Amino acid sequence: MNWTALKSRLDEYEKLMRLDKPIGTLLLLWPTLWALWLSAEGRPDWVWVWVFALGTVLMRSAGCVINDYADRDFDPHVERTRERPLAARRVSPREALLLAAGLTLAALLLILPLATPLLLGLALVAAFLAGSYPFTKRFLAIPQAYLGIAFGFGIPMAYAAQRGELPAEAWVLLLANVFWAVAYDTEYAMVDRPDDIKIGIKTSAITFGRFDVPAVMACYATAFGLIAWVGLASGLGLPFLGGLLTACALAGYHYTLIRERQGPGCFQAFLHNNWVGAAIFAGIALDYAQRGILPF
């Protein structure tokens, strides 16, 4: 294979892993960072920060590959996804499976030298969740809830890595992430709803029907309420609440984008959730920093 052909192949793999679209990685990374800071009371071990950051990239990439493998016969019928490498038959299913397996193995090897039995067990569960999520769209009415567990599983892993235990706050924070994921991924699903109805895929946007916008806002409110509980129970104060109120204001802005249920607005709201996660993290980090607790 010559250089031009190799570069073309790598470009297709990059698109398959969505490395050109980092929003999914960020939505996975922010909850992990919340948990790393909270579990370490503002002083996370930087080795774990780098391990979890790189692991997030690897596992999100693997999840995207498996998602496209699972949807390879559906994506050609959806306008937004028909040019994905597997849907357009520019990458074979066998290549996709080998790539997903390699990425997952790399993520597990990354954590293996430092892992306790508890953390290793959670890592295996995380790999299963990432690999099985795409298939839940065949039978779950709200597969976005399953996605929230998969995208948030870095939370209990972070607590296990730094504390060696799983306190109640880890599970409450994971539940908050489930509601947040249902909110932002319903916005995403509202874009594809007409095509998804035609091809028979289940999504929260279809399940919620005409109550989709109120459901999104209710999920935001529940997620923020649970995060507030965790933060206040951890002794955080005004900077944390300021970050959370900023996230609430951003969610209010999302309402203006999705209330007409138009594709471009809904997709913009979905992308904008990066700033929701960032605002919450900024509030947590600043709260510890203003008390002189710095992560270095």
Image (cartoon, helix red, strand yellow):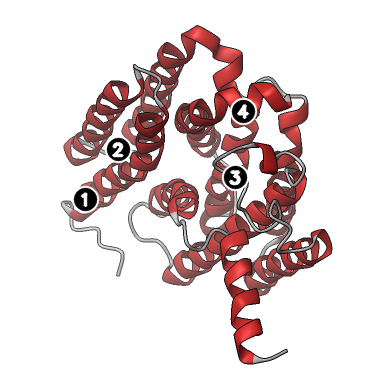
Residue 97 lies in quadrant? bottom right
- Closer to viewer: mark 2 or mark 1: 1
What's the CA distance linking mark 1 and mark 3? 39 Å
Q: Amino acid at mark 3?
A: Thr
Percent x, y of residue 195? 61, 28
What's the CA distance linking mark 4 and mark 1? 43 Å
Q: Earlier in the sequence, mark 4 or mark 2?
A: 4
Labelled pair 4, 2 in contact (Cβ < 8 Å): no
Percent x, y of residue 216? 43, 20
Q: Earlier in the sequence, mark 4 or mark 3?
A: 3
Taking 292 as reference, is 245 above or below it? above
Residue placed under numbered mark 2 in the picture? 235
Residue placed under numbered mark 4 in the picture? 195
Residue placed under numbered mark 3 in the picture? 81
- Closer to viewer: mark 3 or mark 2: 3
The quadrant of the picture occupied by the N terminus is bottom right
- Closer to viewer: mark 4 or mark 1: 4
